[in-house]
Image (spheres, helix red, strand yellow):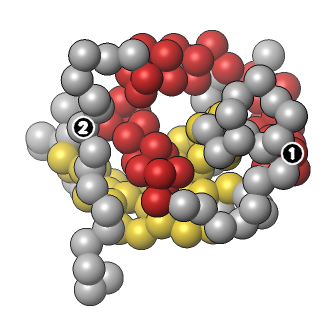
Amino acid sequence: MRALALPLLLAVPLAGCSASFDAAQVRACRLAIPALNPGTRIEVERSGPGPRRGILRIVYTVEEPSRPLRRRTIDCVFAGDGGSLPRGALAGVASDGIPMAEASFLLLRRFYLEDRAEPPVDPGPPRTGK
């Protein structure tokens, strides 16, 4: 299953997603960061094109109590035309270059990002001046 995750993550952008991302897509990707880093202070450094066309990469730092500051990345892919998800919907995530397993992604999307009484915490856009 893990072996299929990377090709799937890389193939999704070929389904019609362009290299530019709108504010809603960047925000959707940012909202996944706290779920991947519980109990940490998060600061978004920058967002932009990822390692392949159609992949959004967000670079951020996490600070945990009694641990050194770490720089991390999240790569997000979005649905194109013709799939089961609406065009532009978050379709896959990789953390530090490692694709999230499909089951984990579905749980993240269903129970953390979409179906909550309160929306997930947004770590915010990059600080200006960086």
| Residue 104 in the image: above or below residue 83 | above
Ranked by sequence position, the earlier of labels 2 and 1 is 1
Quadrant holding the C terminus: bottom left
Quadrant holding the N terminus: top right
| Residue 70 in the image: above or below residue 126 | above
Other residues around mark 2 within 10 Å, as few (<14) / some (14–19) / many (≥20) = few
Give x and y (percent) for residue 38. Answer: 27, 30
- Label disc, if present, on residue 104 of the rendered structure: none
Give x and y (percent) for residue 67. Answer: 20, 45
Gap in Å between the C-alphas at discs 2 and 1?
Answer: 30 Å
Which residue shows up at 65% across the image and 67% down it? 20
Q: Secondary structure at mark 2?
A: loop
| Residue 93 in the image: above or below residue 44 | above
Toward which corner of the image does residue 32 lie, by quadrant?
top left
In the image, 18: left or right of 115? Answer: right
Give x and y (percent) for residue 68. Answer: 23, 53
Which residue shows up at 58% across the image and 17% down it? 106
Residue at the farthest bottom position: 129
Task: Determine if residue 62 is in view.
Answer: yes
The answer to whether mark 2 and mark 1 are in CB contact below 8 A is: no
Task: Report which residue position mark 2 lands on.
Answer: 121
Q: Secondary structure at mark 1?
A: helix
> Given the image, on which type of amino acid does mark 2 rest?
Val
Q: Nearer the viewer, residue 18 or 86?
A: 86
Task: Report which residue position mark 1 lands on.
Answer: 15
Which residue shows up at 41% across the image and 27% down it? 113
| Residue 9 in the image: above or below residue 17 | above
